[in-house]
Image (spheres, helix red, strand yellow):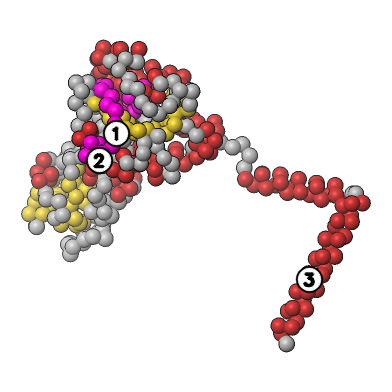
Amino acid sequence: MKLKRTSRVVSQPSDALAGVAKVDRRTKDLTKRIEPGDIAVINHTDIDRVAADALVAAKPGAVLNAAKSISGRYPNLGPGILIEAGIPLIDDLGPDVMGIKEGKIIEVKDDAVYLDGDLVAEGVTQTEELIAARLEEAREGLSVQLESFAANTMDYLRKERDLLLDGVGVPAIKTSIEGRQVLIVVRGYHYKEDLQTLRPYIKEYRPILIGVDGGADAILEAGWQPDLIVGDMDSVSDKALKCGAEIVVHAYRDGRAPGTERIEALGVEHIVFPATGTSEDIAMLLADDLGAELIVAVGTHVTLVEFLDKGRAGMASTFLTRLRVGGKLVDAKGVSRLYRQRISNGQLILLAGAGLIAVITALASTSMGQTLFGITGARFDDLWSWLGNLAWWNQQ
């Protein structure tokens, strides 16, 4: 496979690609440092959709994966998104590629990676045909993942029965949620598009805005102020943490909360919520237990493939949390479809024009209206004559 050069390249053979290496085992951390044309070096088994979208937005020249981008565990969508965006993906390069020092110029030629002319690792260049074949194999083995998902769900139910059924352990917070609608924002699938379509809803109903980790930054970027930030605080900015929102730190069941160190260093008040599962789960449980009238979710996980896309057993908690929240929970896409205006802007303009014509016609049929139109016409004649005289004097 011949790869084109990027904007940040050194002199290399015409059938090779070269660029600055950016290396990280955590893809979401790496995407914050990538500049267009850099070569992303990751170790990400089963690249998920969120990671792929973040990589596409960063515009790397290529993605080098030490692991298998599709392991066959389930039909993950990430590799296809990268290929569709025109970003070369070299797969299964092995652990040696992670030893490349960040900032070095590396060369990608065919299926191999070179540093200073020396071979570092060889992998498999991904193509649309290869990805399609591997996804088909993964679908055939999906029943195994269903069984595992069910087992993890039962295990979570045993551990968090009191929290799920009775709300035991939900902390008291200052933000008043009782009887209000709540919008929970997670930096997940299509969160930007969903927030955009929800603007009329947010403007009219003014729901409580809860950002789950980086979701708080998404709320700020959209021009609003989060009321509550929930999460383990590993992907939210200092700006968001200092914006004045109430902070709820997600802790492990044994009370350990690594995120508190960062919060305390910033001098921000916070509450700790120990619970198993994901941060988006405890945000929903918190809103539900404190009396939210309606919970609208942006960027959260809905389908089984999305649950599996997270790549951890804890996603079983999301399934049970949605069962607990029940009829209160509405996905953002559903709200936008229900709330969409039935009358277009063009129709509104035509309606206003028709109303204006009706008013003018009604006035013209009365003596008072005829008098008004006569006086208005005379004024326009005087104005037109004055403008004509002014133009004549300017020409002299």
For label 3, the SS is helix
* Magenta span contains residue 250: no
| Image position of 35 (left or right of 43) | right
Label 3: which residue?
384
Callout in the foreground (3, 2) = 2
Label 1: which residue?
269
Q: Is residue 11 above or below residue 196?
A: below
Where residue 69 appears, as percent x and y from the top left, is 23, 37
The answer to which of 47 and 204 lies nearer the viewer is: 204
Label 2: which residue?
266
CA–CA distance between discs 2 and 1? 9 Å
Part of the protein shown in magenta? 262-285
Q: Amino acid at mark 1?
A: Glu
CA–CA distance between discs 3 and 2? 68 Å
Where residue 31 appears, as percent x and y from the top left, is 26, 46
Where residue 240 appears, as percent x and y from the top left, is 33, 41
